[in-house]
Amino acid sequence: MEESPPRINSSNRQNKMKKEVTIRKAFMEDVPLIHKIINANARHNTLLPRSLQELYENLRDFFIAEIPEKGVVGCCALHITWADLAEVKSLAVVNEVRNKGVGKSLVEACLREARSLGVRRVFALTMIPEFFVKLGFSNISKNELPHKVWSECVRCPYFPDCPEQAVLIVLK
């Protein structure tokens, strides 16, 4: 009789996944996969879709998550908006690795980069604010953000009825 494998609790699976994940800056060759991952998530209304043009124009903002044998499994961008303000945007992971710490690792990479650049405040506009709150962000009113932040809104499919919630973290 064959023994069944030992059960692994979800926190052990999450820790194992984190060890396998490599977070790095994106390269040109990653853009088609970034596009596919973002827009697959956008179809489920968890974030806004992005065009290939937007992704190529903002490539230097992006981090990607890679797992051996699986390849690119997630992405996230840190976009500088002002001297002391940046936005975490386009956070997306493939379903297979959802809830396994990949998104958290991507956001943490963005926050490390923000600190290294001297950015003091980082915000996100999100349809899943509770994810960011778990990472230390606080819910804020969108009115607290500078008007420059809204320059992309006119291209948004939800404009003018934005369903996104603003969250902010002040870095130490």
Image: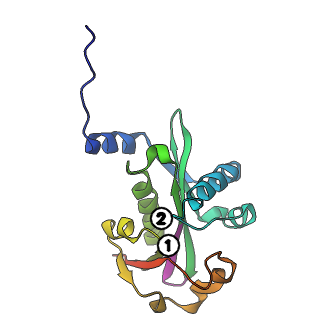
Question: Which residue corresponds to mark 1?
Answer: 117
Question: Can residue 97 be seen by looking at this rendering?
Answer: yes
Q: Are marks 1 and 2 in contact (CB under 8 Å)?
A: no
Secondary structure at numbered mark 2: helix
Instruction: Relative to 105, say whether 159 is above or below.
Output: below
Q: Amino acid at mark 1?
A: Leu
- Residue pushed farthest top? 1
Q: Position of residue 88 (x, y in %)?
A: 50, 70
Q: Position of residue 90 (x, y in %)?
A: 56, 64
Between the C-alphas of marks 1 and 2, the distance is 11 Å
Can you tell which mark lies on residue 110? 2
Residue at the location (47% across, 74% down)?
124
Residues in magenta?
82-89
Label 1, residues with CA under 10 Å away: few <14, some 14-19, many ≥20: few
Total numbered labels placed on residues in the image:
2
Q: Position of residue 29 (x, y in %)?
A: 70, 48
Residue at the location (63% across, 63% down)?
60
Q: Main secondary structure of the magenta part?
A: strand
In which image quadrant can residue 31 be found? Answer: bottom right
Question: Can residue 119 be seen by looking at this rendering?
Answer: no
79 or 90: nearer the viewer = 90
